[in-house]
Image (tube, coloured by chain):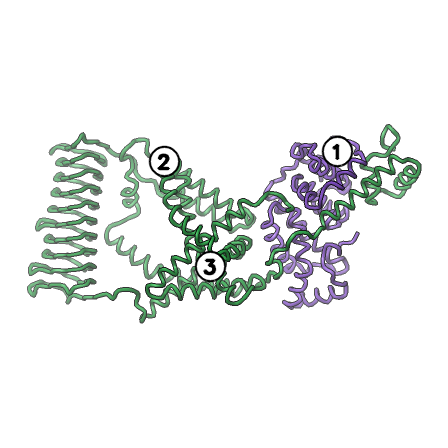
Chain colours: A green, B purple
Amino acid sequence: MNQSDGHFDEMTALLYLEEQLDAGRASEVRAHVGTCAACRELLHALETEGVWLREALSAEDESIPARMIAAPERGAAHWGWIAAFGLGAGGAYTLWSGFVEPWLTQASQAGFTQGNLLTMLFFTGAFWKGWDSMRSLTEFLAVATLGTVAMWLLRRHWQRFTAIAFVAGGLACALALPQPVAAADVERGNPSYTLAAGQEVKTDLIVTAERARIDGDVDGDLIVFCNTVSVSGHIKGDIIAFSQELRVSGPVDGNVRSFSQAFTLNSTVGKNLMSWAQAAELDEKARVGGTVTMGVTNLVLNGSVGGDLLALAHSAEINGSLGHDVTIRGDQLTIGSTAVIAGQTKFTGTHQPDVSASAKLGSPVQVTIPKRGPNYSGIRYYWHQVMFWGASFLLGLVILLLAPGFFFDTVQASKRIGAAVGFGALFLFATPIAAIIVCITIVGLSVGIPAILFYGVALYCAKIFVGAWLGEKLLGAGVGIGAAIGRLALGLAILRALSMVPYAGFWVSLLVVMWGLGAVVLSLHRRMGAPAAVAA
Amino acid sequence: MDRQKTTGKMSNADLAEVLSQVRAGDNDAWGELYRQYAPAIFRFCRRLLPAREDAEDATTEIFMKVRQKLGTYDSSRPFTAWLYKVASNHCWDTLRRRRIRQDLETGDLDTLPLEHPDPSQLERLQTEHTSKEVRGGLAQLPDRARMALVLRYFAEMSYDEIADTLGVRRAFVGVLLLRARHQLRDALSGSGDVSTQRASAGGAR
């Protein structure tokens, strides 16, 4: 007896019922319940409870998901992975050799290095000396939020080292970004600022004013945010200018980067010049040691350039001398009689260039009059389409194999075409607006930036789910992961082919984006809103 | 205890034939095996994991493991026992990863004072609640308590198997089950705060 009242306790009764007592103890219980009504009643109640539990737990009164009908296939994805990685490698090579490398080469020729790009982008300390700390905090919050969301999404696969490596690698990359320089003399004009001739600034000079006049010398970079800027002093670093009008007539040892409505140069620039302007003029006295990169409406180049000229210009007029190649894309090109171009001249535009017979050119001007729209007769176009398909397919495979539940749910949600397209249209336009509004506040950046990132990812993923739906529609419901991969490949190929149709392709792509985005939203809503109850 | 109630109706001879075909790489046999057992494994996972989608994913992953590990299955033992063992290990790992052992380790029945049940009250509880409500109550239990009940009363596992799966001493399995029954009664009757009992619902190695 276990209890002072002479009865067995509940634990002993349960173990007796479950046949977990040794023979001697079981005999004791058996003998006792033969004479004790209370213990007999307890045993009966516990036994009934056991039966009740078994019946409740094994009841088959809930539906089995459709995808449970099909068996997952071991190794079925191997061929898909091999094909996808092959395509992915080809795509990466194409992107690198066709886009990234030429762009990097041009950027390098134009004197862009990571350091001065970051300086230009972040313009450290421009408005507030505490900006560094605030920016660091914001970056930290944004990265932390992004990391948290990534970990949440990958939580089911957290045991997989690839996921850990992915998140940790992303964080490391974010943290490894080089820190921009901080030392600078910050000046605010009220309304104008003047650095008088004979004066010298030993560090970087950052100016915000209505008008800025820099007649003195600057040892570091000059960064200006002004309506009109005039620079006649000696700038030993770079000039980075955001202004309506910029006139540089003093020597610059470094680079000049300008974002201006009107830009004029009539002095020496030691390195490179890059200008985005409505009108840009390099007069006869202008000398640029490196490359000139221009994005302008009207360009007049009367001075000399030691390196290449790369220009995107509505109209360009060249009367000066160029030490290397000229590459211009635009509408009109005029090469005057005094022009000297040592290298090749390439022009891509809608009109034949006007080239003076007296101009001294290293080689005849190569003219390309581009056709509008894609070049359907070129194999490169189709190669790119295959690569784009491969990239989508690869991402689809990753989603399918890492998160099959989400994949199949979203494909299922795609079947509600009206709701998916409706929600997709709403989120397609509302999400960026909401994210931008949220980003207005510093704290909101940590929400807004990840939201925009995920919005971009969702837009790209949209066609995957519609493609899988389309494949299933054409081939019927599949059996297992392998079948889903086949249907995904077919669906994506059809969508890619449809998007190549002139004019209609755009609308098809837009519809697919809305449809798929809506399906993603519906699927996420269902998963997030799912009750926590284990048994429904 | 009859595990076949919750799984397919395949006879032992048929099952042995199907298993040997699966081992030989026959996809049709694999499909047949899956069709027979997947619904039960899905229901098993459904009772253990928080959401239906989790159970779907878990079922898929369990069967992928089963196919990988089929070579290690000892055919002298019941297949369903082995299958539930794989499934329970997977679900328990999933729960542990998510909760990081919220349950505290307790090993002494003296720390778990249990009120002696009133048989008539127990009977009333059973007549008043549907199977669905029982499963709803089960969802409110701590992971280990829920695991114990499902392993015992759904998968029909022995005390040794339960102890092995949950990593507790065999002698403690009875304590776990009794405690879990009490918590389920409290959850269904609404008389007890199950969450406050979570701390005392664990087991000890």
The image quarter containing residue A226 is top left
Mark 2 or mark 3: name the one nearer the start of the chain. 2
Residue drawn at 11 percent across, 52 percent down: A303
Q: Are marks 2 and 1 in contact (CB under 8 Å)?
A: no
The answer as to whether the residues below labels 2 and 3 share one chain is: yes
Out of A459 and A522, give the one closest to the viewer.
A522
Q: Mark 2 points at which residue?
A: A441
Q: Going by the image, does B196 lie left or right of A113? A: right
Out of B96 and A174, give the one closest to the viewer.
B96
Where residue A466 is drawn, which disc sits there? 3
- Please name which of the two marks, 2 or 1, marks the residue nearer to the observer: 2
Residue drawn at 63 percent across, 59 percent down: B68
Residue A344 visible somewhere in the drawing: no
Q: What residue type is labelled 3?
A: Val
Out of A44 and B94, give the one closest to the viewer.
A44
Q: What residue type is labelled 1?
A: Asp
Q: Mark 1 points at which residue?
A: B108
Q: Do the residues labelled 2 and 3 touch (CB within 8 Å)?
A: no
Circle 3 Cα neighbour tier, 10 Å, few/some/many (<14 / 14–19 / ≥20): many
Q: How far apart are marks 3 and 1 (CA)?
A: 56 Å
